[in-house]
Image (cartoon, rainbow, N blue to C red):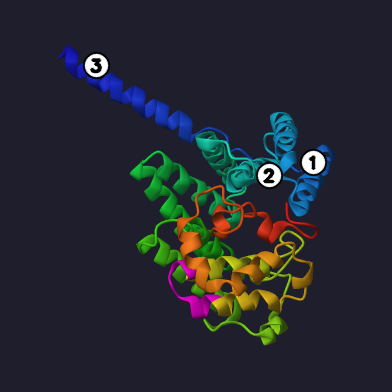
């Protein structure tokens, strides 16, 4: 009898805890302050200039603002992106295994950004990416599956943006079923952006827009060389898949951009084209930390390949 009472009390206690958590006030976003807006300008200036060396200072400044303004989703998401950038371009300043510390931090900040703005598919796509990364690093299948289905939701919410995000995450991994799914997602990106899986021609620029979800298909103030970076990565994935003829076509498509001549990484792409036959074995053998002759995802321009506006490669 005593045992039954203890079990019932334990169940009631557990139920009370669940109710208490479920009934907690919703964490609601607050408008960005003048201080937050000034910091956002610093964030974009660093990213558009390729100033990876400013990361430590930016992380400190963003953390200070986040402590005072924890409901500002822009500052919170920028903290996530700063940790993402630190990890993605760690080839610039290798720190061995320690760079993986950025994964759970990026995941946590994007998780909070999604809590604050649940209808922002970009936040969800990055949350999914770093949930998958954390699951992979920790060999935690439950977390990996959680990230996989988060990414499915993100793709459904904004396919033009998150099909690329999803495929990019596996672009440097083993050429297995996950890689092939990621490569297929790049072809799907062409379809949702341009209405066809054909390699685009200059005629598709008649559809260029800065409005709605289709804006993710083009260059923008956020990603001044989004077009060029997308096709560089697409070509890299086709090289890894052994499809050199179509890799050449996709690399060439990067040149269709009107701002191609201003792209800091155009010479990287042109060197790929000039030595395409030798590129496949080089990419396959390149360790993480190799600056150029590796996949875009593993390079020193994994983020700035799309986001650096002009100037010399960093």
- Name the quadrant of the N terminus: top left
Q: Nearer the viewer, residue 273 or 133?
A: 273
Q: Which residues are magenta?
A: 239-247
Where residue 36 appears, as percent x and y from the top left, is 79, 40
Where residue 19 appears, as percent x and y from the top left, is 43, 31
Q: Nearer the viewer, residue 271 or 227?
A: 271
Main secondary structure found in the magenta portion: helix
Quarter-wise, where is residue 62 in the image? top right
Q: Which residue is mark 2?
A: 78
**Label of residue 137 in the image:** none
Residue occupying image coordinates x 83% and y 42%: 38
* Residue most extreme to the bottom: 203
Quarter-wise, where is residue 227 in the image? bottom right
As measured in the structure, the alpha-carbon distance from the residue carrying label 1 to the one carrying label 2 is 10 Å
Q: Which residue is mark 3?
A: 6
Q: Nearer the viewer, residue 225 or 295?
A: 295
Secondary structure of the residue carrying tag 1 is helix
Specify whether 14 is left or right of 154. Answer: left
Marked residue nearer the N-terminal end (2 or 3): 3
Residue occupying image coordinates x 29% and y 25%: 11
Q: Which residue is mark 1?
A: 39
Where residue 94 appears, as percent x and y from the top left, is 59, 40
Check if residue 20 falls in the magenta segment: no
Marked residue nearer the N-terminal end (1 or 2): 1
Could you tell me if the residues under marks 2 and 3 are in contact, i.e. CB atoms within 8 Å? no
Could you tell me if the residues under marks 1 and 2 are in contact, i.e. CB atoms within 8 Å? yes
């Amino acid at each position: 009898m005593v045992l039954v009472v203890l079990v019932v009390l334990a169940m009631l206690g557990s139920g009370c805890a669940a109710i208490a958590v479920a009934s907690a006030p919703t964490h609601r976003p607050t408008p960005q302050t003048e201080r937050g807006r000034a910091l956002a300008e610093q964030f974009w200036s660093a990213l558009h200039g390729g100033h990876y060396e400013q990361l430590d200072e930016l992380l400190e400044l963003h953390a200070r603002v986040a402590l005072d303004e924890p409901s500002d989703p822009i500052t919170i998401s920028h903290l996530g992106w700063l940790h993402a950038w630190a990890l993605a371009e760690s080839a610039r300043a290798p720190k061995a295994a320690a760079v993986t510390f950025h994964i759970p931090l990026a995941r946590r900040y994007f998780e909070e950004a999604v809590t604050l703005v649940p209808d922002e598919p970009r936040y969800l796509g990055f949350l999914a990416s770093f949930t998958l990364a954390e699951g992979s690093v920790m060999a935690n299948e439950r977390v990996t599956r959680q990230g996989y289905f988060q990414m499915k939701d993100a793709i459904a919410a904004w396919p033009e943006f998150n099909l690329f995000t999803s495929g990019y995450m596996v672009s440097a991994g083993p050429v297995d079923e996950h890689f092939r799914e990621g490569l297929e997602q790049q072809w799907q990106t062409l379809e949702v952006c341009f209405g066809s899986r054909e390699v685009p021609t200059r005629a598709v620029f008649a559809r260029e827009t800065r409005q709605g979800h289709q804006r993710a298909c083009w260059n923008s103030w956020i990603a001044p060389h989004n077009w060029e970076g997308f096709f560089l990565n697409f070509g890299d994935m086709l090289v890894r898949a052994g499809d050199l003829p179509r890799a050449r076509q996709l690399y060439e498509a990067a040149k269709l951009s009107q701002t191609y001549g201003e792209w800091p990484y155009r010479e990287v792409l042109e060197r790929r084209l000039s030595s395409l036959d030798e590129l496949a074995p080089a990419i396959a053998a390149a360790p993480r930390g190799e600056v150029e002759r590796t996949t875009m995802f593993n390079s020193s321009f994994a983020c700035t390949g799309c986001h650096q506006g002009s100037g010399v490669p960093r």
